[in-house]
Image (tube, grey):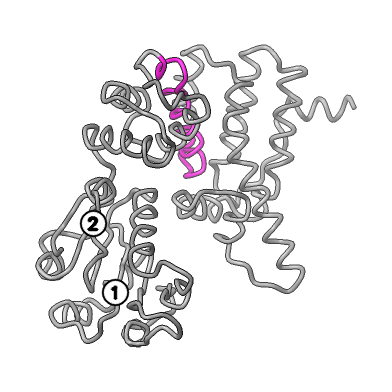
Amino acid sequence: MAGTLSAIDYLTATSPPAGELVNILFGDDPYLKHSVLQAFKESNVSGEDADFGLAQLDCSTAAWCDVVDALATRPLFGTGRRLVILQDADDFVKQYRSNIEDYVKAPTTDGVLVLTVQTWPKNTRLYKQNDKTGLQIDCRKPSEKPLALWLRKEAKRRFGFNLPAESAREMVEIIGCEIGVLEQELAKLALVADTKTPLTPEQIRERVGGWRTKKAWDMLDAACDGDAREAIKQLQRLIQAGQHPIAILGQVAHSLRHFALATQIYRRAEKQGHRMPLRAALEATGVKHYFLQNAERRMKRLGRHRAGELYRWLLDADLAMKGLSSSPPRARLVLEQLLVKIAVSSDVSLGPPPEVATLQRSG
């Protein structure tokens, strides 16, 4: 089935297509890309021999000839077609655009090629040609209406409970079009939902974390991306909504501990003489696949030294908020200092906040 589909339409189809010889996943939503990739794997290389039919190449080292060789190589075991995946392939497409254009017009193998990219402009020859002969899946952040439909189907298919249309719309209204957050909220609802009784909009409002959860994530994301001003702005909104800084610290500490633990795992492997990819270290801490790309980018920006200091920073902030800085205004100052530490450039040296320094001197 050649053409261009939205990721939501693809994932909610009764029988998602197995794909064409050339398939492009484009857009900025890592959750959707991961979900579509999983569907491609299940459709093309499922079963006991799946590992033999799958090849995932590194775009930073692979050449176009390597891709063609992988597509043409028959699996050692099994009878399925070869599935070759290149993720984050924007630079690869720029470098080998003419080769890919020729291949799209007349594929020379029966292998299935999947490229994931951020941008895929409609005005290029490659887009227009592959729209005729291949499959292109739009993995940009979806709008509210298709997202509510996806929520209903996922609730039933994956978690076995009924989510009426008005309740699904309520979830999107509360959280926004953040599909990764919505998926996590579905998993939480599954723990308390009655499989025989549909959840009402009132129950959704009571049980779903709401915009405060999203804003806490936005605040931490901004700090990790170096935007201290935006992080402080989101903190201000949370505090004005009645959130105590101690509660906000608890919400962001979970993600920061993933970074700290990943740093320990990476360093341990390094001491043992193993070269471990940073993404593998993050995955070992439990970071979801669809968050790995952003998590890896933010850890690189944070730097190994500061990432290794996160446990101490979190402990210092916790002690300060439970000691001399327990009042909301002073606790807010401690949290602001933590956000600034995360946001500043890695070449800036930062000491402990004044409250912590006072505790250390008095101890």
Q: Tell me the chief SS of the magenta region.
A: helix
Q: Please name the residue that numbered disc 2 is placed on.
A: 137
Q: Tell which circle, 2 or 1, labels the residue nearer the N-terminal end.
A: 1
Instruction: Find residue 353 and report its image quarter.
Output: top right
Q: Residue furthest front?
A: 196
Which one is in front in this view, the residue at disc 2 or the one at disc 1? Answer: 1
Q: Residues within 10 Å of mark 2 (few under 14, many from 20)?
A: many
- Picture quarter with the N terminus: bottom left
Whether the magenta-drawn stretch holds residue 240 is answered as no
Disc 2 is placed on an element classified as strand
From the top left corner, tell me how far across and down residue 30 is, in percent: 38, 51
Type of amino acid at the residue the image marks with label 1: Val
Type of amino acid at the residue the image marks with label 2: Ile
Q: Please name the residue that numbered disc 1 is placed on.
A: 112
Identify the magenta region: 203-228
Apparent side of residue 212 relative to residue 18 in the rendered image (left or right): right
For marks 2 and 1, give the CA distance: 15 Å
- Picture quarter with the C terminus: top right
From the top left corner, tell me how far across and down residue 147 is, in percent: 27, 36
Q: Nearer the viewer, residue 186 or 264?
A: 186
Whether the magenta-drawn stretch holds residue 215 is answered as yes
